[in-house]
Image (cartoon, helix red, strand yellow):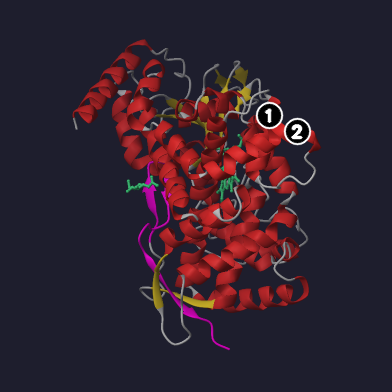
């Protein structure tokens, strides 16, 4: 308790100091969501935490196609809108507009995971290259894990409905399927490890919100109290000791001559570590946790959102079943099959349009002064975002934007835009996975995994909402959107 009080004191003090000393170089941009005088802007910041989404919407409505700023507790957030500016920013080179620096500032990852993850984020390369290129080969394992997990966690009967806590169950299933590819059997089913992976995801997710409120020089200390992952790393290594240490020994022993080495994320992480000359088991463990952090919470939220839509509107099931059944018959449960389900793909993309993981996207930190084509001056140090929710809810981009229309994108695909409207396709009007060079590298894996989960549900179960026809409402925490955390979905084993 006393730690919490101290922490609060430090936060208040640091906010005060920061407001006195921070250069106020954004005067030229209109402010939305609060007064713009120093210190007073914290009134706005408080309001922003509670109303982030409506403030961004207000700014979008007023300044669409242009730029405005909103006060956050720790800084100004500069918001660019409209496809012209968004595409312009997306194309700025890394040394002018950095995704890495923006996410380091906004997520405090470097304090929680250590500076080596920040300086050498090789997990991004691993996801983009090895994981994505090996998807087809790894897919049977993902499918096996999904089937096994459902058998254990959703034991439904043809006669009566069973009530399943949706988000908690999807978290388990997604963690198992993802860790099947990260670590393989039997660790992807180890209850202690899975619990740990979910705990660290929660700890880091909450930690970054709190740590961000401290001034830079206090962040390392704040991290020790708020989100110290050292103990988790020790516990993780203890739990995986029979997996990680022998692997490291084998890599050191056989090096490049190891011809039949395992093909999983752990191996690729160890191979990358080896390039630095010394394989540090703690770094390996941190990377495994990092991968869980970026993959699990995003994917389980996403599939839960889609499941809530399906449960509230069971009339969508039959066209999906028809499509899936036909494809599985010819291609089996393969990655190729997942690429031939435009209706399911559209369903998931539409769910993601309405239920994106975050109210902003395209995070960038301006490193060198930039002047945009409309004359807007962005000084070095500016943190930029684009409001994804407002963009996805814009009538000019999507007719009837508040309506969940599952075939919205499959119909557009039929009109000859085959590539543009797939779940993994990004554009200035669809930023659920970010945009440009730093769009989510995990989206190809996620799209296949999540379509497999949905297809498994649709082929094996009937589902319905607890309150017939009613989708459990979403919950906002500042800029983060969550599916209803405790709502249940009713499952019944499909007959015939
Ligand atoms: C439906 C699930 C997912 C969603 C909605 C999602 C969303 C996003 C978004 C929006 C960004 C970019 C942030 C921005 O521009 O502001 C991002 C980045 C990233 N995502 Fe995902 N993601 C998902 C799944 C995954 C998975 C499964 C992995 C790993 C296997 C992953 C790994 C990453 C990484 C490493 C980055 C940082 C990219 C970089 O540093 O260039 N994501 N994700
Ligand atoms: C995860 O967190 C819960 C709740 O804080 C705790 O009871 C549990 O022991 C943790 N599990 C592991 C494996 O650390």
Mark 1 lies on residue = 274
Q: Percent position (x, y) of residue 231?
A: 40, 34
* Left or right of residue 15: residue 64: right
Q: Magenta stretch: residue 484 in it?
A: yes
Quarter of the rendering containing residue 232: top left
Q: Percent position (x, y) of residue 154?
A: 46, 71
Q: Is residue 49 visible?
A: yes
In front of the other: 281 or 109: 281
Answer few, some or many: residues within 10 Å of disc 2's Cα (few below 14, many 20 plus, some between 14 and 19). Answer: some
Query: Which residue corresponds to the image point at 39% horizontal and 76% vertical from the top-left?
Result: 468
In front of the other: 133 or 251: 251
First to last magenta residue range: 473-496
Residue 323 position (above or below residue 20): below
Quarter of the rendering containing residue 121: top right
Query: Which residue corresponds to the image point at 38% horizontal and 25% vertical from the top-left?
Result: 74
Residue 341 position (above or below residue 363): below
The first of marks 1 and 2 along the sequence is: 2
Q: Secondary structure at mark 2?
A: helix
Q: Is disc 1 in contact with disc 2, using a CB cutoff of under 8 Å?
A: yes
Quote the CA–CA distance across marks 1 and 2.
9 Å
Mark 2 lies on residue = 255
Query: Which residue corresponds to the image point at 38% horizontal and 48% vertical from the top-left?
Result: 476
Answer few, some or many: residues within 10 Å of disc 1's Cα (few below 14, many 20 plus, some between 14 and 19). Answer: some
In front of the other: 308 or 175: 175
Q: Is residue 60 visible?
A: no
Q: Percent position (x, y) of residue 210?
A: 35, 32
Residue 411 position (above or below residue 28): below
Q: Percent position (x, y) of residue 227?
A: 38, 33
Q: Magenta stretch: residue 208 in it?
A: no
Q: Secondary structure at mark 1?
A: helix
Q: How many numbered markers are drawn?
A: 2
């Amino acid at each position: 308790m006393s730690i919490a009080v101290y922490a609060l004191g430090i936060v208040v003090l640091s906010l005060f100091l920061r407001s006195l000393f921070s250069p106020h170089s954004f005067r030229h941009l209109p402010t939305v969501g609060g007064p713009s005088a120093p210190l007073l802007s914290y009134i706005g910041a408080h309001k922003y935490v509670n109303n982030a989404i409506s403030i961004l919407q207000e700014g979008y409505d007023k300044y669409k196609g242009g730029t405005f700023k909103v006060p956050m507790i720790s800084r100004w957030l500069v918001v660019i809108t409209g496809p012209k500016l968004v595409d312009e920013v997306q194309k700025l080179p890394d040394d002018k507009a950095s995704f890495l620096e923006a996410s380091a500032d906004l997520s405090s990852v470097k304090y929680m995971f250590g500076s080596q993850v920040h300086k050498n984020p090789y997990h991004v390369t691993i996801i983009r290259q090895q994981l994505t290129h090996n998807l087809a080969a790894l897919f049977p394992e993902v499918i096996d894990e999904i089937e096994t997990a459902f058998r254990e966690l959703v034991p439904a009967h043809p006669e009566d409905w069973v009530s399943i806590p949706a988000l908690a169950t999807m978290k388990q299933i997604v963690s198992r399927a993802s860790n099947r590819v990260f670590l393989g059997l039997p660790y992807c089913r180890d209850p202690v490890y899975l619990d740990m992976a979910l705990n660290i995801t929660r700890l880091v997710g909450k930690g970054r919100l709190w740590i961000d409120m401290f001034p830079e020089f206090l962040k390392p200390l704040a991290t020790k109290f708020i989100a110290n992952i050292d103990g988790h790393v020790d516990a993780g290594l203890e739990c995986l000791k029979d997996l990680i240490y022998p692997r490291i020994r084998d890599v050191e022993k056989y090096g490049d001559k190891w011809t039949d080495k395992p093909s999983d994320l752990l191996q690729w992480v160890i191979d990358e570590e080896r390039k630095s000359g010394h394989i540090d088991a703690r770094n390996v463990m941190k990377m495994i946790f990092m991968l869980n952090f970026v993959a699990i919470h995003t994917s389980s939220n996403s599939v839960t959102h889609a499941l809530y839509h399906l449960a509230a509107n069971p009339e969508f099931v039959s066209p999906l079943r028809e499509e899936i059944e036909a494809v599985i018959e010819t291609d089996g449960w393969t990655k190729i099959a997942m690429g031939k389900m435009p209706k399911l793909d559209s369903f998931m993309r539409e769910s993601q349009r309405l239920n994106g993981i975050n109210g902003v996207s395209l995070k960038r930190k301006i490193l060198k002064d930039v002047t945009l084509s409309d004359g807007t001056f962005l000084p070095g140090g500016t943190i930029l975002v684009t409001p994804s929710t407002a963009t996805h809810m814009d009538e000019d981009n999507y007719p009837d934007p508040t309506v969940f229309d599952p075939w919205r994108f499959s119909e557009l695909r039929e009109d000859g835009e085959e590539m543009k409207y797939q779940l993994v396709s990004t554009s200035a009007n669809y930023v659920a996975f970010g945009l440009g060079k730093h769009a989510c590298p995990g989206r190809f894996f996620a799209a296949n995994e999540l379509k497999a989960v949905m297809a498994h549900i649709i082929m094996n179960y009937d589902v319905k909402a607890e309150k017939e026809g009613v989708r459990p409402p979403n919950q906002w925490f500042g800029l983060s959107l969550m599916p209803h955390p405790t709502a249940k979905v009713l499952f019944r084993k499909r007959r015939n």
